[in-house]
Amino acid sequence: MFASLISDVLDIDYLIHNPWWLVAFVFQLWMFIDAVRRSEWFWAVFIFIGFGVSAILYFFLVYREAAAASGSTGFELPGAQSRERIKQLQSKIHHLDNAYHHFQLGDVYFQRGKFTEAEKCYRAALAREPGDIDTRAHLGQCLLRLKRPAEAKPLLEAVCRENSKHDFGYSLMAYAETLTALNETDAAFGIWQHVVESHSYARAKVQFAELCIARQQTDLARVQLNDVVKDDVHAPNFQRKQDRVWVRRAKSLLRQN
């Protein structure tokens, strides 16, 4: 099917009378390339040899779900993503209305990229248990994803002051991202440096390298970027899939610097 689409697209006269084939070809090519980039080889094969329905199924079952969660890349918050899990938590909230279930539901929404809904849940959890460090940290990360870094800063700053290793360093990384978003580059530099010294997260190394480049410290930036590329070679498949966007950015920055 994919091959026949290509031959039809190359036939100008055919396109003039059947322009919708060009739309179908572009959509199928788009889904095929996305499947290859995500290493979804099973889907890539079926999109290539199958009818247009394969591309449509891939769009709804894989592409759209991945796009919805893309804003949460790198933040591994707990909580299932299924609709059934959401219904279970909503039922528990209805009957028990405790902070923990509001917090869990917030994490589910966060992972699905529904940050507005996640914020409501985190705030509901804090209303019932104001001092919970996990809820404050995740609300701060949520506000950062909602492009409200000024609101995220005091939450993340307080969490990191209490426990700089909270969430395996993800809270500290979010704090560094917040400072960067607020253009507080001197403070951000120190936090990023602490993160990359304590953890090997590609997300942290690339963003620290970008800040180094902005400060004309290209040698230090190259060290971080080379680490990302070298680590990717030996990383397990799930890690390589999660860090793919950062590895590509690292390679691009290395070519430019």
Image (cartoon, rainbow, N blue to C red):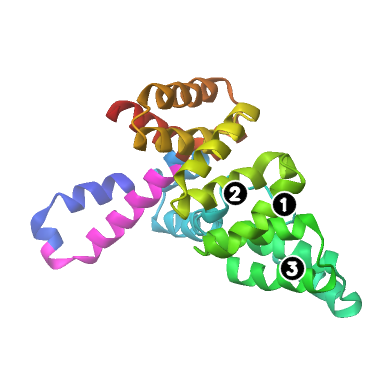
Q: Quadrant of residue 19?
A: bottom left
Q: Nearer the viewer, mark 2 or mark 3?
A: 2
For label 1, the SS is helix
- List the residue tagged with mark 2: 175
Task: Tell me what residue is drawn at x 81 percent, y 67 percent.
Answer: 130
Q: Which mark is residue 101?
A: none
Question: Badge 3, how many Cα within 10 Å: few under 14, some, many 20+?
Answer: some
At label 1, the amino acid type is Val
Does residue 69 belong to the magenta stretch?
no
Give the mark nearest the N terminus, 1 or 2.
1
- Extreme residue in the bottom direction: 94
- List the residue tagged with mark 1: 159
At label 2, the amino acid type is Tyr
Magenta residues (range)? 16-35
Circles 1 and 2, Cβ within 8 Å, touching? The answer is yes
Q: Quadrant of residue 151?
A: bottom right
Query: Left of 203 or right of it: where is 87?
Result: right
Gap in angstroms between the C-alphas marked 1 and 3: 27 Å
- Above or below: residue 83 compared with residue 186: below
